[in-house]
Structure formats: C-alpha cells, structure tokens
Image (cartoon, coloured by chain):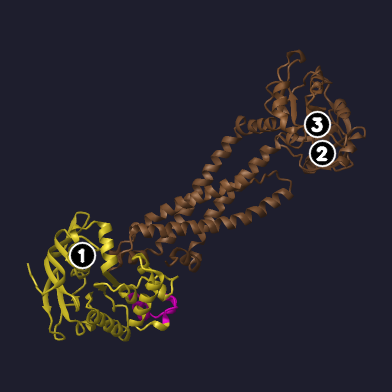
Amino acid sequence: MNTIHTPEPTLRALGVSKSYTTGRLRTPVLDELSLSIDSGALTLISGPSGCGKSTLLTILSGLQGVDQGQVHALGDDLGLLDKPALERFRLRHTGFVFQDFSLFPALKACEQVELPLYYLGMSRSRAQECARQALDEVGLSSHRHLRPAELSGGEKQRVALARAIAKKPQLLFADEPTSALDAGNGQIVIDILHGIARNHGTTVLCVSHDARLIRHADRVLCMEDGRILQDSRTFPNIACPQ
Amino acid sequence: MIALARKTLIYEWRRFMPVAFAVGFACLLQLLQVSLVLGIFKSASVQVSGSSAQLWVGYPGTATVNLGRPIPEGVEALLRMDSAVTRVEPFWWEDGNWLGAKGNVAVSISGISPDPDGLLYAHVLAPAIRARLREADSVIVDRADLDELGVTVGDSASVNGHRVHVVAESRGLRSLSGINVLASLETARRLAPDTTEAGRPTYFVAQLGDPRNADMVAARLCCQPAFGPYQVWTAADFARRSELYWLLDTGAGAGVLFLSVIVLAAGAAISGQALMAAVAGSVREYAMLNALGVGLGNLRWVVLEQALWVGTAGLVGAAILGALLLAIAQSQDVPVVFNAYVTLACILVALCVTGVSGLAAVRTLRHAEPAMLLR
C-alpha cells in the first residue's frame, strides 16, 4: 500500500480498491490506494489512459462506490451514504467540470448557471446574483444572454465552470477540463481553476493528461496501473508517464 | 426556477415534433372514430331522434326501430283517451324494392303525415318539403341516397311494382338501417306489399302537453292487454334502444372497441418511442445535473413535464385538424356526431397516453449516470 499524507485533508481515501467486471473478466482499476487532499490547492492527477485516474475522481466525488476501503469527504464517510444522501451531499458541496461541457442547448449562459442553484432552494434573486458573480469570475459577464450555439468551445467550458462554482462548493472536480480546448482557452481555464482554489479555499481536484496543466498545479499525483507512483509539490520539473 | 422542460421544447421543437404528431394523431383517430361510430349508430334511430314525438308505441320487444311489426289500430284510441296526450300519428314502416336506373335496391318506406306540423321527421323535414308528399305517389329521399337509387329530383321509379315520383330531396335521413324513402300515409299504404298485416301501422307516436311527463305517461299507458300486443317507450328510451342494438347486438361495438384499443396501444408505443429518443438526446445534460446533485426524482419531473407539454401541443393540432375533418364529413353527409363529452374523453385518453409515454421516457434516465461523462 502506498500512503501519502497531508495535513487537514478535505478528501481522504483509505485502502481503496475498485475493479470492473465485463462478463467473466474482472479488471482491477485501483489497488488499495490511500490518499489525502488539502483544501485551497489545485491538485492534479495525471497519468496514461486507463491508469484509473478518472475512476479515482468518481470515487472521491461520490459518483461511484468502492469495492473495498473508505472514502471521506469533508468529514463524511461516503460509503455510509445512500444514493439520495449522496445526491444531497453533491448538491451542497461539490462542483463538476467535464471535458464535454454538457450545457443545455436551450438555455442562456446565465440560466445554465442558475439552474442547479434553484435545486438548492435559492430564491430567484439570490440565484441570479450568484450566477452573475460566477460568470464575472470566469470573465463571461458580457455573454450571459448567449446560448451554447453562440459560444466558442472555450467559452462553453467557462460557462460550465461558472455553473460548477456558482454555489461556492467546497470541492471542485474537473475531468480533462482543457483537453478539448486550444492553448489560449486551456490557459484561461487553468488560471480560473487555480484562482478558485487560491481565492475561495476550494479543494480543486483535476484529472488530466494535459501536460500544460502540470506547471500550474499546486500538487501533482502521477498514477499508473491503479497506484500513485509519485506525489510532487515541487513542480514544474515533474514528468508523469503519459 | 428555470422552465427547463418548456424552454427545451421551444428551442428544440424539431426533436419533439414526432412525439406531438404521434399523440395528436392518436387523439385525432380516436375522436374521428368515436364521432363516426356515434354518428353511424345515431343514424340507426334517425326516425326517432328526427321526430318531435315524446312517446313511441310499437310491437312488444322491438329491438330497433327498423325491426318494427304492425300493431293493433285500437292502440290509437288508448293514446287519444289519455289527457296528457295532445296529438297522435300513425307511422307505417314497410320494406320495399326500389327499381330505378341502377336496378333493384332494398329500401325502407316511411309512411308519415304530410301535415306541416307532423310529428315524424319534424327535425329533418321542412314543412314546405313535407307538404309535397300530398301529391299522389310522391316520395322524398335523402340527397346522399339519390345516386345509389339512380334518380334525381323529378325522376320516376318503381317501388314494390308501383310508380313513384321523387318530388324533393332531404338532408339527415341517411340511416345505418338502409335507405329511407318518405311517403305520405296514403302512398305508403299503396306501396305496401300485399300481406295479411297490410293496413295496420307499425307504430303510433304521441305528443304530450308537457314533455317532462313522458316517463310517467309511458308507464301509465303500458300493460293494457285489452288493446292487444303493444309496448310504450319514451322517444329517448327507444332511440337508445335502437342504437344499443346496433352497437352491442350486431358485433359492431366489439369491433369498434377492439379498434380503439389498437389505436391507443399504437399511439402509446409510437409516442413513447419518440419521446424516449427525444429524452435520450439530452441524457448527457441530465447526467451533468445529476452529478451536480440534482436528484433523479427532479429530473423525472422534467421529463414528465416535457411529455405533457408535447402532448398538449399535439392535442391542439389534433383539435384544429379534427374540427376541419368533421366539418368536411358533415358537408359530405357522412354521419358524424360531435360530442363535447366524447371530445373531453378523447383528450383525457390522449393525455393518459402521453403520461404513459412520459413514464416510458423516464426510464431513459437510467442511462443518465454521471460516470458516463468521464473520458
């Protein structure tokens, strides 16, 4: 078992194992992995395709259960929560950004951001104010009335980011957030993610094989074959296997 | 709250159009089918519903108006003796063989009073046209039957071997039970086949001073064995009896019911599949909302709301098209009956179909797993 310990963790995995079964074939993805992640930092998990980094993100965010081990997020043992409780946990505490922006074609940028806030029970005026602030933070105030079809790829990802941060989550998970973007837009998204961690004290956990992200991360975890091979807080000299 | 369901429908209306079409057509088919069936079966009692009499007296156990048998003439006296009765008329109903330009056609001869205030067919025959029956050997037929009889107004033909003249045409006489040929009582007697029962009317109809007493008077007039075999019905009862005979005893009702179930099942299946396809197009966005913590229960409501909006849009289209088609049918003398309750029932059934489709589409959300968004 490889253990990496950091003080005051907001996310903690203890001896986590996970495998997928297809027919009679069982494929182990995570192998007794333990890990702690701090708040206020952008932590990057990098590694080659199939190394288990996305599976680790789904487990730490409560999107998927484990076969073995424990996951603690903000002090809650996620393994003890049922599906509705996990949904409530995610609604209150987590934001997500995925490579595919998953925006509703019919909604304007401000509506995309407001939508999840209403499910939190926010009033209309409060939701609109939070959405405005989030769009400000990602630099899209002037695009608030545009629909996805009228936005570039980078702008769509920034709207998705605004949607994720509008409720001021303590945990922000990003899966390949820059992979579909050009260099310029990728850089903007990286800077925003970094700023969110620094300015709001948010725990930002990012999974990517985009080498551009490494030098912007506060901490880089290199994974291979379901295990963490390297944990570095001294970037940018680290080189993870791709 | 953002009206996600409605905004998506409006913005992506092309994606949801097949669902609206499926629901709309299912409703339209139901509505037209029921209107046609009601119209056709209603036509089976046109002699009753088209007349202004409140009481009908015929042979006991007569199942439908066209299956009447002659009754004793003395019954007329019984009716006239009742103080509630203000007018009595005999009604001759005979089978006939029409020989026109197109050959032999089986017809039913209605012998009625040609008086302007005659009770029989009072609602479908204008007094001026009715008066033409006073001419010797004159008959009136429905304009929709002229072609089948091979005549036009002014032509002559033969009924049961007697010469008749078509002096006018009418509207609304088309009946499920066959072609109606209207004649005066005298003409009808002459045209009747020479049988032992000839000369006796098939029915007597009566008008009451107060139509609200119809049930009470019918009950009072029944069961007088001294007057021979007869039975008294209120007009509403006799019309319903005739319609139910055609609907239930001829097997037509079972056929219609079977067809309705098929239409409903097909509508539900098609709209369900179309809605599932439309919902599947948004499954990644729903998965994203679920990742952000929006519960599947909330997402199900969005899908159901979409289904109901699409259904409503389909129903509006069906209503417009249905009104148009019913108007065309009526203009072509196709017997259709527009009934507000029936329309409401069709709309409710269509909304149920939409609800079932929505529930089927909700199952698509099983695929809205947030993990699917990961690369």
- Residue A129: image location, x then y, percent: 38, 76
Q: What's the amino acid at mark 2?
A: Val
Q: What's the amino acid at mark 1?
A: Ile
Q: Nearer the viewer, mark 3 or mark 2?
A: 3
Query: Is A104 positioned to the left or the right of B184 in the image?
Result: left
Q: How many neighbours does mark 1 have within 10 angstroms: few (below 14), some (14-19), or many (20 or more)?
A: many
Q: Chain of mark 1?
A: A
Q: Is residue A8 above or below residue B225?
A: below
Asked if labels 2 and 3 touch by Cβ distance under 8 angstroms, the answer is: no
Q: Which residue is mark 1?
A: A59
Q: Chain of mark 2?
A: B
Chain B palette colour: brown
Q: Is residue B12 above or below residue B366?
A: below
Q: Quadrant of residue A230?
A: bottom left
Chain A palette colour: yellow
User: B1 or B366: nearer the eye?
Assistant: B1
Q: Main secondary structure of the magenta part?
A: helix
Q: Is residue A194 above or below residue A172?
A: below
Q: Which residue is mark 2?
A: B141
Q: Look at the image and say whether residue A74 sits in the magenta stretch.
A: no
Q: Which residue is mark 3?
A: B110
Range of the magenta residues? A143-160
Query: Is A181 positioned to the left or the right of B181 in the image?
Result: left
Task: Identify which residue is drawn at 62% across, 34% down.
Answer: B247
- Residue B284: image location, x then y, percent: 35, 66
- Residue B281: image location, x then y, percent: 41, 64
Q: CA distance from mark 3 to mark 1?
A: 86 Å
The local secondary structure at tag 2 comes to strand
